[in-house]
Every structure is written in structure tokens, then in C-alpha cells.
Image (spheres, rainbow, N blue to C red):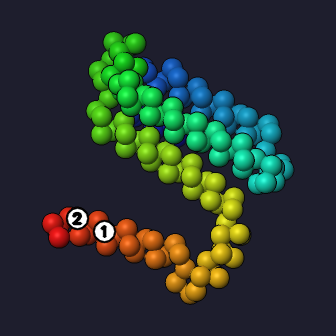
Amino acid sequence: MATTFTLLSSGPSLLVTFVPGVALAYALFWTTCWRQMPEPSRILPIYLIALAVQFLHFTEEYLTRFDIRFPGLWSAPAYPRDLFVGFNMGAYAAFTVGALILLLPRLLDLAGLLGPRGAAAQATLGNAEAHASALSGA
């Protein structure tokens, strides 16, 4: 992750903020969770609240043109809007999948109740069909 931030950084903007944050998060993981992971029921509510707050925070960043202003603090060029939005949405998708992984045993039970195809497979196929239709102009 630190490598990704280093490669995508506009000037030193991510190097002086996110890269040290990755190092801190890694250190906290090793000192708190490495030997014994906490129970999902204890951390998932806090995690999901933090994720919801982060979604609101991204909205604020988008509306206030943070992609231009943040790199400007270091006289660096603005981030391309598509990169800024795409990177954040990719990160939020990964964070959401992380929450789903904690719930995986329960989700697998639910998928089994919905039949052999399962809800996830049907949603994936429906999404693929919608993208194919949009690309073909249908």
C-alpha cells in the first residue's frame, strides 16, 4: 500500500501523510491484533461506523475540490479527478469487502438458503450484463 501511495503521489502530498499512516497502521496491527484477532462482533460496529464517516468525508473532499487543494499545499499539480475518485472508490470497495470477510460464515449460510446460484452470483451476473449493455449502446 505504501508503494501505491508513493507511485500515485503528486509531489510529496501522499509521502508525508499517507505513507507514515500506513507504517503506523501496520505497527498498531502487530502490537494489537497479530496474536489474537478480536471477535468480529466487537469490532464490526465500530468499523462500519468509521466507514460510514469516511464516505461522508470523501463527499466533503469531492465537493470542496480537495484533489486540487491538497497537492497545492506542496506546490504540486492537482490529482486528475478520475484518479482521485477511482482510487477512493477502490479503497472503499476494499474496506467493504474487509467487513464482508468478517461476516463470511454468516453470508455463506444465507447464500445456501437462497439456492445453488446464490445472491452474490446473481448480482455479479446482473452487473456484468448491465455493463455489457451500456458498452454496446443497447
Residue in the image at 59% along x and 82% along y: 114
Give the CA distance from mark 2 to mark 1. 6 Å
Residue most toward the left?
A: 137
Q: 76 or 108, which is in the foreground?
A: 108
From the viewer's perspective, tell me whether residue 100 is left or right of residue 8: right
Question: Would you say the residues marked 2 and 1 are in contact, meaning their CB atoms lie under 8 Å apart?
Answer: yes
Q: Position of residue 94 (x, y in %)?
A: 53, 51
Residue in the image at 44% along x and 40% along y: 88
Q: Position of residue 61 (x, y in %)?
A: 43, 28
Residue most toward the bottom?
A: 116
Badge 2 marks a residue whose secondary structure is helix
Q: Amino acid at mark 2?
A: Ala
Residue most toward the right?
A: 36
Q: 86 or 134, which is in the foreground?
A: 134
From the viewer's perspective, tell me whether residue 121 is left or right of residue 99: left
Q: Residues within 10 Å of mark 2 (few under 14, many from 20)?
A: few
Q: Amino acid at mark 1?
A: Ala
Tag shown at residue 61 = none
Disc 1 designates what residue? Answer: 130
User: Does 122 sit above or below residue 64?
Assistant: below
Q: Position of residue 35 (x, y in %)?
A: 83, 48
Position of the C terminus, as image quadrant, is: bottom left
Badge 1 marks a residue whose secondary structure is helix
Residue in the image at 48% along x and 24% along y: 15
Disc 2 designates what residue? Answer: 134
User: Does 60 sit above or below residue 1?
Assistant: above
Q: Residues within 10 Å of mark 1 (few under 14, many from 20)?
A: few
